[in-house]
Amino acid sequence: MAARIIDGKAIAQSLRETLAAEVEALSGRGIVPGLAVVLVGEDAASQVYVRNKAAQTKAVGMRSIEHRLPADTSEADLLRLVATLNADDAVDGILVQLPLPAQIDAQRVIEAIDPEKDVDGFHPVNAGRLATGLPGLVPCTPQGSMRLVESVRTDLAGLEAVVVGRSNIVGKPMAQLLLQRSCTVTIAHSRTRDLAEVCRRADILVAAVGRPELVRGDWIREGAIVIDVGINRVPAPEAGEGKTRLVGDVAFEEARARAGAITPVPGGVGPMTIACLLANTLQAAKARRGN
Ligand code: NAD
């Protein structure tokens, strides 16, 4: 039987509706959560992300504060802006869009953000809180992926989970979240031996690699929950010369024949990321303002 398709668009929409209702209730008490997004340079993909983030922030009733800096901005100038935003009481969340130009050390910038306003959840304090099971701000993409898993099944205790990819942004925090839900977690990566066999163990398989359709159908355990985080642009000559399309890290048609539930690309994890950014901004606003 073909897998159930997990509709990330619809789940993100419903999360935004819940957030909008909470924001409205807070606004009635004079609190309007504010998200500051900083974009350095002209990277085309980053411009689109930042535009979408601002639009969705406003759509749920929060304040969007945008800072666009030229590509030749110095690290010192960016750190000064971060310090200003840290000190600004109207700002609950700070997001510095990555990647940053080569003259700026991204890690230094991440560590300069007040952990209470670190809505990306990349600060070592928040990574450490996640790893030790303390409340904190959880990175948006794995948080969204977890919400998608839980839309299929809530009791995950004892399940075998395999996360392919060990980045600080997706793979590692995803593994922590699955561990918190009492899964038996394996983290696979580029040096893993016999990746196919490792993946076949998974009741929950999360692919966060950045390699188009790396995970094949016969790597999927019958009935598994498959979360495809990858976003890869590949040529699509069938659609016309020079055309491209998006595919995930999982060979979707093959995998859906065996999986129990699977996220599509696009329309799976992607829409969840910004919705979780808004959830983090609301969480930060409530925590900072003593709610
Ligand atoms: P990354 O490049 O930082 O990490 C990739 C990981 O994959 C590494 O840990 C590496 O060890 C592993 N890897 C590489 N080649 C491998 C192979 N052949 N076999 C097994 N493991 C291998 O990437 P990232 O930032 O974690 O992103 C991963 C993917 O997720 C990318 O396609 C990215 O575009 C996508 N992404 C999507 C969202 C979203 O909102 N949906 C957010 C972030 C990232």
Image (cartoon, rainbow, N blue to C red):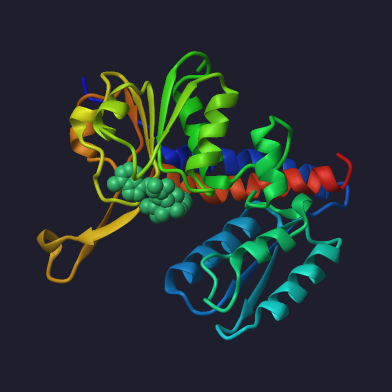
Residue located at (43% from left, 40% from top): 8
Q: Determine the residue positioned at 27% across, 40% down.
A: 250
Q: Is residue 110 left or right of residue 190?
A: right
Q: Position of residue 29 (x, y in %)?
A: 88, 47
Foreground of the two, 29 or 147 = 147
Q: How many tags in the picture?
A: 0
In the rendering, at what x and y percent does residue 84 appear? 81, 71
Where does the N terminus fall, quadrant-wise? top left
Would you say residue 32 is visible in this rendering? yes
In the figure, 46 relative to 264: above or below? Answer: below
**Residue 19 rendering spot, x and y as whole percentages:** 66, 42
Between 228 and 266, which is closer to the camera in this rendering? 228
Vertical comparison of 38 with 195: above or below: below
Vertical placement of residue 65 versus 62, above or below: below
Image-based side of 174 in relation to 220, left or right:
right
Q: Image point 22% across, 40% down: which residue?
A: 251
Is 198 on the left-hand or right-hand side of 148? left
Q: Is residue 126 left or right of residue 287?
A: left
Q: Could you say which quadrant of the image residue 241 lies in?
A: bottom left
Instruction: Please say whether residue 230 is visible from this viewpoint.
Output: no
Quadrant location, the C terminus: top right
- Residue visible at 43% across and 25% down in the picture: 161
Q: Position of residue 216 (x, y in %)?
A: 21, 36
